[in-house]
C-alpha cells in the first residue's frame, strides 16, 4: 500500500511541476530599481549568499519571488537530484531540506538558514530599501 501512495504522489508531482514552474515565472513581481551604485553594493553583499532549492517547491518559489522583488542576484543551487549541491547541503548544512540559504559571514564562518519565512525575514532585513 505504501508503495502505491508513493507512486501516486510522484505522479501528481510529475504532472504539476511544469505548471508550478511556469506559473511562478509568469507571476514574478517586478523588481525594485536602485541607483547603480546602490545595486552594485547589494550585488557585492549577495555574492556571499546561495539558495539551495527545488525548482517546483512552493516554499522555494515563495523565497525566489521575494529575491526577484528585491532585485537580488543570489546564486541558486538546485539540490533536487543527487549531486554536489545536495551532498553539500547534507554534509555542511546538516540536513537535506529546502529552501536553505547559505550565508557566508564576514569572518569566514558559514550560517545555514532553513525555513522560507526565516529566509524572507533575513532578506527583507538586509536588503529592503527604507
Image (tube, helix red, strand yellow):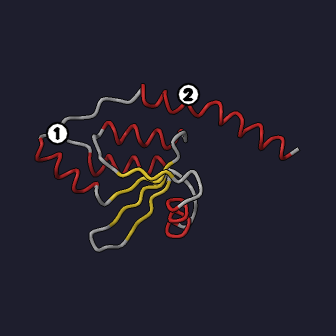
Give me the residue at 44% from left, 51% from top: 118
Give me the residue at 38% from left, 48% from top: 121
The image shows residue 104 at horizontal and vertical percentages of 34, 65
Q: Please identify the quarter of the rendering in which residue 103 is found.
A: bottom left
Give me the residue at 49% from left, 49% from top: 53
Give me the residue at 28% from left, 54% from top: 46
The image shows residue 38 at horizontal and vertical percentages of 14, 47
Q: Please identify the quarter of the rendering in which residue 33 is found.
A: top left
State the SS at label 1.
loop
Q: Which residue is mark 2?
A: 19
Q: Which residue is mark 1?
A: 34
The image shows residue 64 at horizontal and vertical percentages of 41, 41
**Labels in figure, total:** 2
State the SS at label 2.
helix
Q: Is residue 65 left or right of residue 48?
A: right
The image shows residue 62 at horizontal and vertical percentages of 46, 39
Q: Is 75 rendered above or below residue 32?
A: below
Task: Check if mark 2's residue and mark 1's residue have beta carbons within 8 Å.
Answer: no
- Where does the C terminus fall, quadrant-wise? top left
Label 1 crowd bin: few (<14), some (14–19), many (20+), radius 10 Å: few
Q: Is 91 rendered above or below residue 83?
A: below
Question: In the image shown, does 63 or 17 lie closer to the viewer?
Answer: 17
- The disc placed on residue 102 is none
Amino acid at each position: 500500500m505504501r508503495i502505491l501512495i508513493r507512486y501516486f504522489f510522484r505522479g501528481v508531482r510529475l504532472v504539476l511541476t511544469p505548471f508550478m514552474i511556469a506559473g511562478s515565472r509568469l507571476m514574478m513581481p517586478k523588481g525594485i530599481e536602485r541607483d547603480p551604485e546602490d545595486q552594485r553594493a547589494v550585488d557585492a553583499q549577495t555574492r556571499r549568499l546561495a539558495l539551495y532549492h527545488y525548482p517546483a517547491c512552493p516554499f522555494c518559489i515563495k523565497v525566489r519571488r521575494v529575491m526577484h522583488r528585491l532585485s537580488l542576484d543570489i546564486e541558486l543551487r538546485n539540490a533536487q537530484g543527487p549531486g554536489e549541491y545536495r551532498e553539500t547541503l547534507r554534509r555542511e548544512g546538516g540536513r537535506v531540506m529546502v529552501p536553505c540559504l547559505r550565508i557566508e559571514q564576514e569572518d569566514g564562518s558559514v550560517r545555514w538558514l532553513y525555513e522560507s519565512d526565516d529566509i524572507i525575514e533575513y532578506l527583507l532585513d538586509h536588503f529592503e530599501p527604507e
